[in-house]
Amino acid sequence: MSTSSYLTISIILFSIGTIGFVVRRNAIVVFMCVELMLNAVNLAFVAFARHHGSLEGEAAVFFVMVVAAAEAAVGLAIIIAVFRNHRSIETSDADHLRL
Amino acid sequence: MESMGSHREIVDASLAIIPLCPLVGAMVAYIVGQKQKDLAGWIATAASTLAFLFVVKNFFALGTNQVLLDKSFVWLSVGNFSIDFAFQFDHLTAVMCLVVTGIGSLIHLYSVGYMAHDESRPRFFAYLNLFLFSMLLLVLGANLLVLFVGWEGVGLCSYLLIGFWHKNIAFAGAGRKAFVVNRIGDAAFLLAMFLIIMNYGSLDFMALSRVMPGETSEGLATLISVLLFIGATGKSAQIPLFVWLPDAMAGPTPVSALIHAATMVTAGVYLMARLNFLFEMAPLAMLVVCMVAGLTALVAATIALVQNDIKKVLAYSTVSQLGFMFLAAGAGAYWVAIFHLVTHAFFKACLFLGSGSVIHACHHEQDMRHMGGLQRVMPFTAATYWISTLAIAGIFPFAGYFSKHHILSALEHAGAHNPQLFPWGVPLSYIATFAAILTAFYVTRSAAMTFLGSYRGHAHPHESPWQMVVPLVVLAGLALVGGVFLEGALSLQHYLGHAIPVGDVHHGESMASFSFLLNALLHSWPGFLGVGLALFLYTQAKEIPGKIARAFGPFTQVLANKYYVDELYGAIIVRPLEGMARFLWKGADQAVIDGSVNGTAAVVEISGELIRTTSTGQLRHYGFFMFVGTLFIIFFYMAL
Amino acid sequence: MAGVGVLVLFVKGFIVQQLTLGLASFCTWVERKGSALIQDRVGANRAGAFFEVGDLLKTDNVLLQPIAFVVRTLVLAPTLALVRFLGVLGVINTLLNDALKALLKEDFIPEGTSPFLHAMGPFMAVAPVFLAYAVVPLAPDFVVAGYTIRPQVVELNAGLLFLLAMGSLAVYGVILAGLTGNNKFSLLGALRASAQMISYELAMGTTFATLVLVYGSLDLYEIVMAQAGSVMNWGILHGTGIVSFIILFVVGMAETKRGPFDMPESESELVAGYFTEYSGMKFLLFWLGEFAEIALFSLILTIFFFGGWHIPFVSLPEGVWWAALVGHAVLIGKVLFFCVLQIVIRWTLPRFRYDQLMDLGWKILLPLSLVNLVVAAVIELSLK
Amino acid sequence: MNIFFILLSAIALSSALGVILMRNPIHSALCLIVNLVAIAGYFALLNAHFLALVQIIVYAGAIMVLVVFVLMLLNSKLEEQKSAGLFMLVVSSVFAVMFIVHMSKIYGAEFSTSGVASASLQGTVANLGRVLFTQYVFSFEASAVLLMAAIVGAAMLAKTTPERPRGDGERV
């Protein structure tokens, strides 16, 4: 398969993730949409890595995974903390810092 | 003048560890001190002792005609111009480092006892260690910029420590005064550095010592030298910038001993010794140095005659002694200046610590008129104070004799290699001799008023704890035998000869010979005169000083008011500055700047009111804007 | 050529699948009968045990009587004797009656959940375990008709990682079961089980890293081949192998959620934990998956620490079919030993408290495995 | 290979749509797991076997387990009550389609080949390890520190104060 097919899939997945991020209210779903976007980018990285025949792209994916893992740990902890205070994980409810 | 840097062997060594010891010590002492206040002092003492041990190690590692060098890292690099964060350890540095860390350690130990009941002693010890770090940077720095960092660092620590008891407004003001006065000198120092960078493109001592002698006009050398000397007058309290040092006595006494007697104030002398090749090229600057130093030595000594505060006496004495050092340096005898620096560090630190011990015993009473007869209750303090008194008076065989004797002879022979100085050398030596007599007199006066006679105060004095007595004894021992040791055993002149020009080394007569002893005792006459006079006046004929004071009424008044220098500065500098500042405050700042700032703020506020409608607090909206923004950027770049 | 390859793949897959089921069945039987032995009771011995030849094939027809006699004595009687024997041993009860019962039972689906997800629960519990068998080598290479055949379904050079991946996927079966149970007990059981599995996966991953470091390969076949020759080459005797073995053994017991680690399904508190709402064949699938996992861990332990198919002091010829067969038998023998050992432990030790379980995982096994990793690395470096 | 690609694409895209269309967040999470496994399949197709397995271990095995775990903990009131903003959906979809069309045009023009076959991509575990431990060793160590910080931070955030009175039935 040509690299462009993988890239196109990656772009579509990224866009779907973005739409989800904008439309959904549940914080955990929003979080999952971010993961979806990260994965789309990972796919593009690997496709580029193969296209250029170098390992830099794969190394980048590795680091994205590390960051995603850290993000999951902290992000979910934040969501739990928010839930404790608000009894809700709707992102639209957490707007107390608005002016 | 031969260039000293050319034939020296450069050896790599790790010197950064020396200043790092007190730096780490400062942090640890402060942090640990939050929980364990008593531990802070011991940690700081251990850190400085460790630094001392490293210095000793390097002292023994340093061979003849060697210089140890540690290029830690490239600090800044602009075009062709680059400066390393580098340390250098030659024989001059070795002597300075030994003094700084050795006396520093003793004073740390002393402070453990002195500050035992202070609430914020962790802060004190952190500052003290930080000072040691800065001072080591100053003496170890391999270029002017590192030296300058240390220079500023010691200034900062001095400010912090003078104002250590910052709840007392006057004390805090004294700290501020020291800082501001030092700024004036530092400005000149900076100008000198700019000039050096502009003309030579380097600040490295060794590079400069190679480059400068060849391609410097006398005018440029004089300009740089004078600017550097102005910097030195700030740090080393010479006329006209000496006014801060007496006020600096507001700080705790160990601080006065360490910073304002033994180490920091001698930085200017060190600077001159370090840049000797530069001053050598500027005979006129040397003359200026000598004149200012001679004047300072005399003026400060006369003021010290009439002070009643024991620490003020010592403070003016320090100013005067620094004048002696600059006299030696100005006469081209740098090693003599360093010699006096070392011996002065011994006996003046001992005097200050002794005064601290007395003050401690008398419950923070500093006025000598309320002391007296303390010899009976404080035998150790009294004995060490007397030894140091005799040392500063310049009586053989105490340490002060040797250095002072060398200064006087250096002045007499100054014309030999500096023709500019020739007509002035002998008069200057007379002035110095007179100042030496005064020195002996006022120090003996302070000792007599404190320790002899009967007690005139109301407290219940007692001998100080061992942490304070041990440093006193050690320093008194050094004041006693230090001169003989440096002159004879170490032969300081020969030793420093590896690093700075010292003239002809005299290996001459043995110190044990009878003629030498007789000669030495004869040359101690100013000391004997001053001490004897003071003892007579303040123990036998107690009514005479009062009569003298009344007889010279106006002159005594002038002396007691320190020649009205502070008032003079107030009238010609401070008040106009205040007026200008007030105009700038009311006219420029409030009207123009505040107006424009408030106007800007108003614009921001209005636009903020408008834009804040986009801040909905909804994560989705922010995400959406981000996405659209990214799209916009992509389209924009693709369109290009 | 491709056709042959695909054929071989399918054959291998089929064989391994049968082997998996066989091992799981064996474990089930040992569980039933072994527990009885340990608890000093008889256990399952009824099903099939009362078959008597009796009146079977009794006929009044004189002509047929001899034939009937022959059939009865030569065919029927031995068969029935075997059945009786197996019945007394409990094999029939375990393999036939239980399965039949499960098949015939009502497939209960709780109200308010998605039937699809409810069915996915047992599937996700079993599928990763069965898939994990795909990368496990079961015997040395052998040559048949010019083809060198490796008795391993998928020759993956990162087999160890595949095991880890499948192990991490197994959590979803538990989670789905708990979520779709629509029941507090199953939810609590699933929470406990998934927390337990995640916790012990850390120590497992770290120990796997240690093993990779020791063997210098992720390929399971190479790991086994590295242990050829003397017993001293076996993983357990190599460096800190004994520590790794103990960690992995304990982790294996915990990952299968059995033995003293059966907090998730502690019957006395949670009815049956995360599969409370499952019945019939779905329940049996969980059961089967559990035993397949026991066998899988035994297989892993054998491969990592006990030389796989290698026999101490005996070297089998290479590439011969019977050598592969002997090797396979040796491997399976070692595996069965560990299966039995795990079941014996399960029936011997009392259950942990939940906090003790977590303490063991986080405060003992994880630090121990980290130290083990460092020590093993130092030893490997010093050996080089 | 083509057939695998098409199959994977169908799975990946439908499961991705499932993530954002499912009302129940549990179902979204399960869809996302499928999607992640499908992406691991892409990685395998692209010869990045190591990353494919790590993708399953890290994403499917760790991150998504955490997510599902949290969903189980916060079991109540997870269904979204309000309707998703239709306006936002339409607007963002329009922008997304613009994005997809534009980018795929660019990609189609520049990356229409399947790329160079490189020896450095063979046996990727060892090679990737070599790259990570030489060229990116600082980033590698930094990511270790990041993970450590994340662990501590998560523990701090999720910790309940121990002196909270018991019997506070509503608290989870």
Image (cartoon, rainbow, N blue to C red):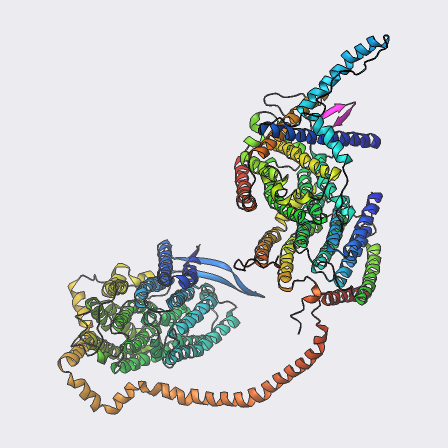
Is residue B286 covered in magenta? no
User: Which residue is at the front of the view, B44 or C109?
Assistant: C109
Q: Is residue B324 left or right of residue C314?
A: left
Q: Position of residue D114 (x, y in %)?
A: 81, 48
Residue D165's place in the image compared with B285, above or below, is: above
Q: Is residue B207 left or right of residue B610?
A: left
User: Residue A17 falls in which quadrant of the image?
Assistant: bottom right
User: Which residue is at the front of the view, B50 or B627?
Assistant: B627
Residue span colored magenta: C140-150
Query: The C terminus of chain B appears in which quarter of the rendering?
Result: bottom right
Query: The N terminus of chain B appears in which quarter of the rendering?
Result: bottom left
**Residue C338 visible here:** yes
User: Residue B117 falls in which quadrant of the image?
Assistant: bottom left
Q: Position of residue C81 (x, y in %)?
A: 72, 17
User: Which residue is at the front of the view, C164 or B254?
Assistant: C164
Residue D37's place in the image compared with C230, above or below, is: below
Q: Position of residue D12 (x, y in %)?
A: 79, 50
User: Residue B459 falls in which quadrant of the image?
Assistant: bottom left
The residue at the point 36 percent across, 69 percent down is B119
Q: Position of residue B607 (x, y in %)?
A: 70, 79
Q: Is residue B496 left or right of residue C57?
A: left
Q: Residue furthest front?
A: C60
Is residue C141 covered in magenta? yes
How many marks the image carries: the answer is: 0
